[in-house]
Each structure stands twice: as structure tokens, then as C-alpha cells.
Amino acid sequence: MSRLSASEVFGLSPLRTRAREALLTFRGDALTPKSRFDHTSLKVLRPRLSIALWLGRNPTGRRVAISNFFSHVQPPPELGWSVRVTTARDFRGKQGTYDSHNGTDFAVSPGTTIVAAAPGKVLRIASEFNRGGLKIFIDHGHGVVTTSNHLGRSLVTVGQVVERSEPIALSGVSGIDGFLLFPFSAPHTHFNVWLNGTPVDPFSIGDELSLWRGGNNPCPWQGEAIDETFKPTDWSEARVESAIKSCLHAAARHEMHSYKDLGERAMAVLFHANYYPTRFGGAPQLYNASYERAPLLTLPLSSRDFDGIAWEGSSQ
């Protein structure tokens, strides 16, 4: 692990911006409902796992625990981001997650190396205290985009093409949840997967294909030969422009329009439409084609640190 400053770990700079973003979590605004919490939210706390990871020890050894899975039953976004545990169901049919959780949380100590889960191009690096802290968005082609959230330090730049398992960041707990719940919430990297612009669970249910290579027991890339060539996504410029026009938030529209590169512009739309869905009239479609699920991804962690998933240590 590499050492990070406290400001990097929690993503606290600049303080005025972070304070303003934190208020949006609890107050909301005219286009963004406030987040929802209640006593069931305490279920997300994993103090035994958390304390060990903060001390630089992994209680599951060379296998990584998952502190929250993707929830397949989510409340409407108009009700606000819910950290309650009521309707939540992970792909196993359990409540190993919370209601609005749309990614997979890999519980790792701050400073852990995060790697690319497949070849791709970095199209956005952003940091919002109320929406996952420092994040890196990668287009992998095939209609697949991933992002790693709550990072401490980026190791890549926008426009950079990365290979599978290439280091992209050092993990942190940046964002409001890591700051407020320290040290009882397990430090983790929240890993999002989008297919055709929609957040999906890389783990599979029933007969559907897993997005992980090797099925529902994913591993880091071990260096084995894989026949793959990265082909950037064929974004629809007309659909991207239409989505920007449909955004009701003036500052967000201005930001999305500011990117000259179509890929960066499309990724900005993808970000805003998924992190602030109530600012749009509907879910925008940004692709010229529709893509099927396919086993593309390896764990976004290095084989130097991990061998796979610790099911027995993952959230129940």
C-alpha cells in the first residue's frame, strides 16, 4: 500500500466546495431530492472489517471482501438516494447491500492499488463529495463503462488509453459517507458498471451471462493471454446533444457542452444522468447500437494483492 495524506483519503479539498456538496446530500435542491437515512442504515456499518482495514490488515487474507453488492430492487430516484435497508436485494437474494446501491463495494485499505478491469480509455476524472468522492470513468467499448469511486489519488489522466490491470488509482474513502462514518464503515472502492448507459450488476442471476471473466467467482488478471483489442465506443453525437438539451440544470448543461471531444462529452452526460437522474426527463440513450452482456471484466485489483473474492467475509 502507498501512503496518502488525510486530505487525499477523505477528499476534503477544497473545503468550501466540499461543504456545499455535503449540504446537497441533506437538503437537496429544486432538482435533486435529499438523501434518505433511518435506523436500518446502521446495517451498512462493518466495524470488525473496517477497523482491521484501517490498521492495514485484511482479515480475509489475499481475498477481498465485498461490503455491499448491487441492489436489484431500488426505489425511484425521485424519492432520493436511499441508504436504508428495506427493499434491497443483491444477486443472491440477500440484503447484502442497501436500497439505492448501484455498484459493488470492494473492501480494501486506503492506499490499495486500483487497476483497470479491462482495456479502455479514461474519459472522465471527477470529484464530488456528495457523489462518491474522487472517481475515474473508463470506456471499455462493447457498450461497457466502469468507474471506481472513493479514490484517494488518480494515477492516470483524461484521454489516456489503459491496458487490462494497469494501475489507475490508489484507493481512499473520499466522499461524505467515508468521512461521516469513519472508522465504522469499511473503507472500500465502489465499482460501477454501466451497459448501454444503464447501471448493471456484473454478477449474474440465473441464465444471464456474468460480466466477469470466469463467471460469478471473479479474479484479478493473472497475466494469462487474452485475445482482445480495445475499440472505443461508437457514441451517437445526435443523441448526446439531445440528452444535454434535455437536462434541466443550467450549470450541468454548460459543463457537458464544454467538452470538445465527443467521448468526454458523452461521459459527462453519462455521469450527470446517473448521479443526478432527476435533472433529466428520462434516461438518455447515447449509443448507435445496443450491446449484450459479455464476460469482459477482471477484478479492478492487482494480482499482487489479491487472488479473488472472500465470500465468507462479504456482506450478508
Image: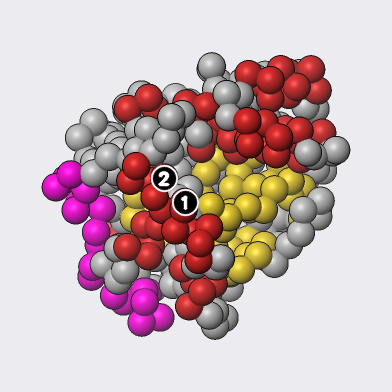
Amino acid at pointer 1: Glu
Start-end of magenta stretch: 38-58
Q: What residue lies at 30% left-to-right and 63% top-to-bottom? A: 181
Q: What residue lies at 32% left-to-right and 63% top-to-bottom? A: 180
Report the front residue among 78 and 305: 78
Q: Check disc 2 and report the residue beneath it.
A: 24
Instruction: Indicate whether 18 appears above or below 37.
Output: below
Residue 172, x across and y down, in percent:
49, 67
Q: Is residue 44 left or right of residue 308?
A: left
Q: What residue lies at 32% left-to-right and 27% top-to-bottom? A: 79
Q: Are marks 1 and 2 in contact (CB under 8 Å)?
A: yes
Residue 270 is inside the magenta segment: no
Task: Examine the image and state in which quarter residue 229 appears.
Answer: top right
| Circle 2 SS class | helix
Task: Examine the image and state in which quarter residue 85 appears.
Answer: top left
Residue 267, x across and y down, in percent:
69, 37
Whether residue 286 is visible here, answered yes or no, is no
Amino acid at pointer 2: Leu
| Circle 1 SS class | helix
The residue most toward the right is 260
The crowd level at tag 1 (other Cα within 10 Å; few <14, some 14-19, many 20+) is some
Q: Check disc 1 and report the residue beneath it.
A: 21
Query: Rounded to the nearest whole Å, what is the CA distance between mark 1 and mark 2?
Result: 5 Å
Residue 54, x across and y down, in percent:
36, 77
Whether residue 156 is visible here, answered yes or no, is yes
